[in-house]
Image: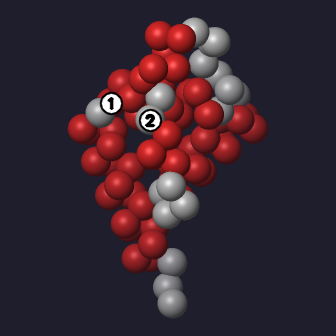
Amino acid sequence: MSLAPLMFRSLVRLMVSLIREPAASVTTLLYYSNLLPQNITWERLVRREMLDQENYLFHFLINFLRCFW
């Protein structure tokens, strides 16, 4: 099985979430990469359902931000 269909599906899911809910998507990325200050207002925007197992690019972005920021 090729990785292309998995990555394409993950890319589509990432783009749809960024277009549909940009504030929640960016907040979730920053929260799970430990770059968001501890604040209840910010934590309300975090969407835990974006972290399912098949959202590979979302996990990649979180880990990239954790390592290099």
- Disc 2, SS: loop
Which residue is denoted by mark 2 in the rendering? 47
User: Which numbered disc, 2 or 1, marks the residue closer to the eye?
Assistant: 2
Point out residue 60 in the picture as x, y percentages from the top left corner.
60, 51
Please tell me whether residue 48 is drawn above or below residue 45 in the rendered image.
Answer: below
Q: Residue at x 45, y 67 (%)?
A: 7
| Structural crowding at the residue carrying mark 2, measured as other residues with C-alpha within 10 Å and reported as few (<14), some (14–19) or many (≥20) | some
Residue plotted at (62% across, 34% down): 32
Residue 67 x, y percent position in the rendering: 75, 38
Q: Amino acid at mark 2?
A: Arg
Horizontal side of residue 15 vs 64, given as left or right:
left
Q: Compute the Cα span from label 2 to label 1.
A: 11 Å
Q: Is 21 situated left or right of 41 in this image?
A: left
Q: Secondary structure at mark 1?
A: helix
Residue that sits furthest to the bottom in the current view: 1
| Image quadrant in which the C terminus is located | top right
Q: Residue at x 37, y 66 (%)?
A: 9
In the shown orientation, is residue 65 left or right of residue 28? Answer: right
Badge 1, how many Cα within 10 Å: few under 14, some, many 20+? few
Reading the image, the residue beneath label 1 is 22
First along the sequence among labels 2 and 1: 1
The answer to whether the residue labelled 2 contacts the one labelled 1, judged by CB atoms less than 8 Å apart, is no
State how many labels appear.
2
Residue toward you, 2 or 23: 23
Q: Residue at x 54, y 61 (%)?
A: 53
Say which quarter of the image contains residue 33: top right
**Residue 26 placed where, x, y %?**
44, 29
Q: Is residue 45 above or below residue 14?
A: above
Tag 1: amino acid: Pro
Q: Quadrant of residue 20?
A: top left
Q: Quadrant of residue 10?
A: bottom left
